[in-house]
Image (cartoon, helix red, strand yellow):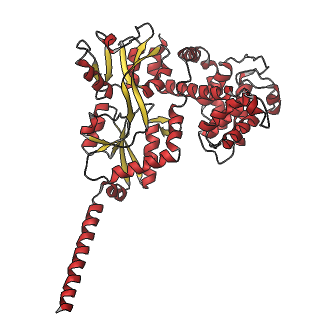
């Protein structure tokens, strides 16, 4: 009898375990994360903008795109991108299950928590007022009353204005569903509206294209940007997102991406931008074909070569520095001899020589250093010399930072002008601040040239001012 009861107990226990396994398997098989892996597809909704996703010279780019691509690779699945350029429709597409994640420069707000979940923050932003030179600089929200204000429909800035309406009853604004922040900046720069309000990252990137634009006060508190996910009891995808961001925060990837997309955007002044745009109209057409020819011959982007040349000579083929460097690419006499360039002020010779010299610097950079750090370091070497770059990389490594990352090396280059540090190096003193500014300027000029080519119709309006 006892043996029979034991058998029944074992049988019941086995049924219990089997049922539990079936339940667990059912739960797992129906999880969002499992479905993504089963279908081999992660669907992301985003928008076209310089701070999220766009098609660059080498294909899709933007911080949101790179984060999404790395997350898809982390999961081992393919990435599908849905473009939704009407901002107010992005979060509804998550609520309706049209995409798994919204990665579109979305601020994490209490208001939005009511209908979506958020992943970890990856950058913090402020809402800033943009205005045109000649307009009154607003000192408070009160100064916006009675003015024409435009914001993107569904944006955190629209909610912010709504929150202030109770205290400033004469505050009026218009929300545009089909205009981007860049287009609203264009309206502001061309005096078609008085003010627009946008995230500080978007304003920092966009204002370079509009030299008559100014940054006013910040409104509200600093807010984080984060991915948005559908509210659900199934937390499988949410947990995967959390683990992914923890990983890239700890291994430095996230810091690297912040520097790549936003680390240089505040290093060009409105006056620099205004002069640059003037020279684009008046000087670049004369030499554009030379940059394009060299780009084809050496497999480069002509706009990148043009950006180097502008930083070197302001596209003046007769430029001569106090130290004797000459021409569009400002070659030294020794470099010209090494490259067998007989006439440094000949535009074609100078462009070819400068391109070859840059490529020779990039060739010297250790093969393990990947893009874009390889290019930024090659530019620094073009400016200050390869030996000084190596000295800075050694100082970087000695301090415990990464000598293969430009964002780290650029912190130590300025030390080469300090006796305490350059006495410890092989090549000694150098004006270490110069290559840092040099690289940042070229990055900005390149961004401007890419933008001008892609937004020609906007530039025509801008050129009239």
Name the foreground residue: 407 vs 183: 407
Residue placed at 64% from the left, 29% from the top? 436
Q: Quadrant of residue 231?
A: top left
Residue placed at 22% from the left, 77% from the top? 15
Name the foreground residue: 284 vs 319: 319
Vertical arrangement, residue 376 with respect to residue 135, above or below: below
State how many labels appear. Answer: 0
Viewer can see residue 216: yes
Instruction: Tell whether 167 sits left or right of 317.
Output: left
Instruction: Tell whether 260 sits left or right of 393.
Output: left
Residue closest to the far left: 1
Viewer can see residue 360: no
Point out residue 174 in the picture as x, y percentages from the top left corner: 27, 19
Quarter occupied by the N terminus: bottom left
Residue placed at 36% from the left, 18% from the top? 196
Vertical arrangement, residue 275 with respect to residue 71, above or below: above
Q: Quadrant of residue 155?
A: top left
Point out residue 325 in the picture as x, y percentages from the top left corner: 77, 22
Instruction: Tell whether 280 sits left or right of 425.
Output: left
Point out residue 434 in the picture as x, y percentages from the top left corner: 68, 25
Vertical arrangement, residue 85 with respect to residue 371, above or below: above
Name the foreground residue: 65 vs 27: 27
Point out residue 372 in the picture as x, y percentages from the top left corner: 59, 39
Vertical arrangement, residue 90 with respect to residue 201, above or below: below
Residue placed at 50% from the left, 47% from the top? 250
């Amino acid at each position: 009898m006892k043996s029979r009861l034991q058998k029944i107990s074992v049988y019941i226990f086995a049924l219990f375990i089997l049922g539990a396994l079936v339940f667990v398997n059912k739960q797992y098989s129906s999880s969002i994360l499992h479905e993504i892996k089963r279908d081999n597809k992660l669907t992301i909704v985003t928008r076209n903008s310089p701070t999220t996703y766009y098609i660059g010279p080498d294909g899709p780019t933007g911080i949101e795109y790179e984060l999404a691509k790395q997350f898809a690779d982390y999961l081992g699945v393919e990435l599908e991108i849905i473009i939704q350029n009407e901002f107010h429709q992005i979060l509804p597409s998550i609520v309706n299950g049209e995409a798994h994640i919204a990665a579109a420069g979305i601020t994490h707000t209490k208001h939005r928590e009511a209908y979506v979940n958020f992943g970890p923050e990856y950058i913090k932003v402020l809402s800033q007022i943009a205005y045109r030179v000649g307009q009154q600089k607003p000192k408070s929200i009160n100064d916006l009353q009675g003015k024409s204000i435009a914001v993107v429909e569904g944006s955190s800035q629209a909610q912010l204005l709504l929150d202030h309406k109770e205290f400033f009853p004469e505050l009026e604004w218009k929300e545009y569903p089909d205009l981007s922040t860049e287009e609203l900046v264009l309206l502001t720069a061309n005096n078609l509206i008085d003010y627009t309000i946008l995230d500080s990252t978007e304003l920092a990137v966009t204002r370079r294209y509009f030299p008559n634009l100014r940054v006013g006060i910040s409104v509200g508190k600093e807010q984080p940007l984060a991915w948005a996910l559908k509210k659900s009891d199934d937390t499988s995808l949410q947990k995967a997102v959390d683990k992914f961001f923890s990983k890239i925060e700890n291994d430095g990837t996230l810091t690297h991406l912040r520097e790549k997309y936003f680390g240089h955007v505040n290093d060009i002044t409105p006056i620099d931008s205004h002069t640059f745009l003037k020279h684009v109209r008046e000087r670049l057409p004369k030499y554009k074909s030379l940059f394009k020819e060299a780009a084809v011959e050496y497999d480069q982007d002509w706009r990148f070569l043009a950006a180097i040349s502008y930083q070197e000579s302001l596209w003046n083929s007769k430029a001569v520095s106090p130290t004797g460097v000459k021409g569009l690419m400002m070659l030294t006499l020794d470099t010209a001899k090494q490259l067998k360039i007989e006439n440094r002020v000949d535009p074609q010779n100078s462009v070819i020589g400068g391109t070859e010299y840059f490529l020779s610097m990039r060739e010297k950079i250790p093969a393990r250093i990947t893009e874009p750090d390889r290019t930024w370091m090659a530019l620094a070497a073009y400016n200050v010399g390869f030996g000084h770059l190596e000295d800075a990389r050694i100082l970087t490594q000695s301090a415990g930072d990464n000598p293969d990352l430009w964002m780290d090396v650029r912190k130590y280059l300025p030390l080469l002008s300090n006796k305490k540090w350059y006495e410890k190096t092989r090549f000694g003193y150098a004006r270490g601040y110069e290559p840092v500014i040099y690289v940042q300027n070229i990055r900005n000029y390149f961004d401007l040239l890419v933008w001008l080519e892609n937004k020609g119709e906007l530039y025509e309006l801008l050129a009239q001012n």
